[in-house]
Amino acid sequence: QRWSPAAVAQARAQGRPVFVDFTADWCLTCQANKRVAIEIPSVRAKLKEINAAALLGDYTRLPDDITAELNRFGRAGVPLVLVYPRNPAEPPIVLPEALTPGMVLAALERAAR
């Protein structure tokens, strides 16, 4: 599902964890993260298990709304992966730029509590 502030707010209002991957076709680190730590069976299963909303922020054409969101988290560009906890009062977990499956799964587990 496409990222938007409204999509994040809607999922959080439903009490769901939210996984957001800001990525771009030209971003090599993003593509590596996708291959080794995001689009893999264990992460897909965990997203389903915790009923998380998975959102994609496509930065390939540098849209202003995503630039603003990246800046909000102190990033000049992609990758940026955020995991919003089930509890809407808690801030998102900001993952490092280079990901491992363990990092993603641990953040999802924490977000589901």
Image (cartoon, rainbow, N blue to C red):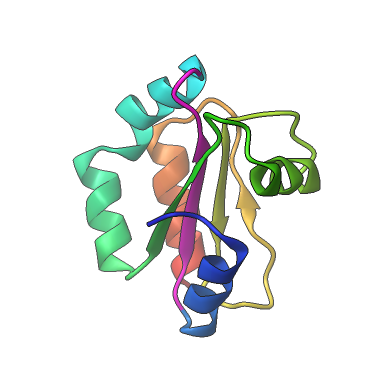
The quarter holding residue 104 reads top left
Taking the image as shown, residue 92 lies to the left or right of residue 56, namely: right
Along the viewing direction, whichever of 48 and 27 lies nearer the viewer: 27
The quarter holding residue 67 reads top right
Q: Position of residue 8 (x, y in %)?
A: 55, 67
Q: In which quadrant is the N terminus drawn?
A: bottom left
Q: Residue at x 75, y 46 (%)?
A: 68
The mark tally for this picture is: 0
In the image, the segment drawn in magenta is: 16-26
Q: Position of residue 80 (x, y in %)?
A: 59, 38
Along the viewing direction, whichever of 42 and 17 lies nearer the viewer: 17
Q: Residue at x 50, y 61 (%)?
A: 110
The quarter holding residue 16 reads bottom left
Taking the image as shown, residue 67 lies to the left or right of residue 51, namely: right
- Image position of 6 with respect to 100: above or below: below
Q: Position of residue 62 (x, y in %)?
A: 63, 32
Q: Residue at x 35, y 38 (%)?
A: 38
Taking the image as shown, residue 39 lies to the left or right of residue 30, namely: left
**47 in the magenta segment:** no
Taking the image as shown, residue 19 lies to the left or right of residue 62, namely: left
Q: Residue at x 79, y 48 (%)?
A: 72
- Image position of 92 with respect to 36: above or below: below
Most distant residue in the bottom direction: 14
**18 in the magenta segment:** yes
